[in-house]
Image: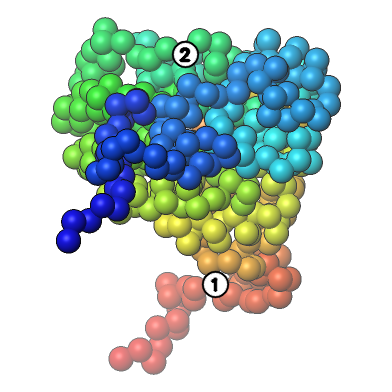
């Protein structure tokens, strides 16, 4: 008996949606695929469609959020620090105001134009440490490659607000050649981080050319990629992408979840595809006032990440960058959060709390002070719950008589 049931075949690819293969046995095909937020599923799940349909202007934002207040302020800020929000990330906004964490991280706010004198457009002095174009060499054994200036979504707390979104360009062949030459001449560089912008906004063949060029340098042992696409554009993590990435092990990926609201089924699936490809995943969270500067919120976030096989790696104190003063918290707040975590979650779920010091001084770790008292005989300690314990210092075996009775 002939099977006349309709069928749909979707081939996962990086090609634009109009080139996907979709067929039915019985013409004409009247099958209508389920929609996501009013958009056909094949479009919504296509990362190129998500990029092409980012919210870039205030009229587009008002169309999505008709009740948006202070639209003129949003336009004024966006003219200085551009806006781009993927449809996926915009769908996570529940309230169109600063009380919503996703809204606060994605929609321009007038506070971004307030800049105290101690802020800088480049507080880490990356541009001063760029021996060749698009490569930052701040640490002895590590280098940072800025593969693109484009991101799927322009975070309002970005440390590279000076370039993010002002132009959307990718590294060229000449620049890549200079980077490879520099790496070969500096074999002490064993760890290369590919960042931007977001490298995963590049087409897979372009990204592979960058990775392959860096992997061709024998002295480079580890390649890391920094990307926020699992959060703001999880559709980008296709099987084609992961198949390419697994050819270049050892490869690590650091992503950037800031709040539990960003952990969706799509994000979890994207991380699972990367982890299943043998890629270790880390997460770099930025401490943001009014967004995640709460111990319980952070505990929830880090527990959720570990369940997704994503290791909390860094908790960053907000950089001293222009346009983010409204997000900065006192350092003490971060220490309080770390103490809460230390008392309540596994060490696997606890990141290092760091300040990326201004002037290019590098990452400085900060921890709560658990030492109550020090003497030559003992150190008195306390745990995160306030309980104290005495730890005896080692005996001095060099003293006369210290070894008596030892056979």
Residue 61 sits in quarter: top right
**In terms of secondary structure, where does tag 1 sit?**
loop
Give the image location of residue 227, x and y in percent. 44, 35
The image quadrant where one finds the C terminus is bottom left
Q: Residue at x 47, y 13 (%)?
A: 168
Q: Residues within 10 Å of mark 1 (few under 14, many from 20)?
A: few
Label ID, residue 393: 1
Q: Do the residues bearing badges 1 and 2 touch, measured as CB atoms within 8 Å?
A: no
The image quadrant where one finds the N terminus is bottom left
Residue 105 sits in quarter: top right
Image position of 299 (left or right of 278): right
Please give the residue where the numbered disc 2 appears in the rendered image: 168
The colour style of the image is: rainbow
Q: In terms of depth relative to the viewer, which is nearer, 1 or 201?
A: 1
Give the image location of residue 314, x and y in percent. 53, 45
Give the image location of residue 68, x and y in percent. 79, 28
Residue lying at the far right of the rendered structure: 70
Residue lying at the far front of the rendered structure: 1
Q: In terms of depth relative to the viewer, which is nearer, 352 or 244?
A: 244
Q: Earlier in the sequence, mark 1 or mark 2?
A: 2
Image position of 282 (left or right of 36): left
**Relative height, residue 11 to residue 309 (above, below):** above
Q: Residues within 10 Å of mark 2 (few under 14, many from 20)?
A: few
Q: Residue at x 31, y 10 (%)?
A: 172
Give the image location of residue 323, x and y in percent. 70, 21
Q: Taking the image as drawn, is residue 333 in sight?
A: yes
Q: In terms of depth relative to the viewer, which is nearer, 208 or 340?
A: 208
Label ID, residue 205: none
């Amino acid at each position: 008996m002939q099977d006349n049931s309709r069928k749909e075949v979707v081939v996962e690819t990086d090609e634009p949606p109009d080139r996907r293969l979709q067929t039915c046995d019985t013409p004409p095909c009247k099958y209508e695929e389920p929609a996501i937020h009013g958009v056909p599923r094949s479009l919504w799940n296509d990362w190129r469609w998500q990029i092409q349909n980012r919210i870039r202007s205030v009229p587009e934002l008002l169309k999505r959020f008709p009740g948006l207040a202070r639209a003129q302020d949003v336009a004024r800020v966006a003219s200085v620090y551009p806006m781009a929000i993927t449809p996926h990330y915009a769908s996570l906004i529940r309230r169109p105001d600063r009380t919503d964490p996703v809204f606060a991280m994605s929609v321009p706010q007038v506070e971004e134009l307030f800049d105290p004198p101690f802020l800088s457009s480049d507080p880490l002095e990356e541009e001063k440490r760029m021996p060749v174009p698009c490569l930052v060499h701040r640490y002895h054994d590590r280098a940072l490659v800025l593969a693109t200036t484009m991101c799927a979504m322009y975070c309002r707390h970005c440390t590279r607000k000076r370039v993010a979104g002002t132009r959307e360009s990718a590294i060229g062949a000449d620049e890549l050649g200079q980077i490879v030459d520099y790496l070969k001449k500096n074999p002490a560089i064993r760890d290369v981080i590919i960042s931007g912008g977001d490298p995963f906004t590049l087409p897979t063949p372009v990204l592979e050319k960058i990775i392959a060029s860096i992997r061709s340098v024998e002295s480079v042992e580890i390649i890391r990629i920094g990307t926020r696409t699992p959060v703001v554009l999880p559709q980008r993590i296709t099987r084609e992408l992961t198949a390419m990435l697994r050819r270049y092990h050892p490869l690590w990926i650091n992503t950037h979840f800031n709040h539990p609201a960003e952990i969706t089924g799509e994000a979890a699936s994207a991380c699972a595809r990367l982890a299943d490809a043998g890629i270790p995943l880390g997460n770099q969270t930025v401490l943001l006032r009014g967004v995640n500067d709460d111990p319980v919120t952070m505990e929830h976030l880090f527990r959720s990440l570990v369940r997704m096989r994503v290791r909390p790696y860094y908790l960053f104190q907000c950089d001293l960058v222009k346009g983010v003063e409204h997000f900065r918290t006192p350092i003490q707040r971060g220490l309080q959060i770390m103490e809460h975590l230390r008392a309540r979650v596994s060490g696997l779920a606890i990141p290092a709390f760091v300040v990326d010091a201004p002037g290019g001084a590098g990452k400085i770790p900060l921890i709560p002070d658990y030492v109550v008292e020090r003497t030559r005989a003992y150190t008195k300690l306390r745990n995160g719950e306030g309980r104290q314990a005495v730890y005896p210092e080692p005996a001095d075996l060099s003293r006369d008589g210290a070894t008596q009775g030892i056979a």
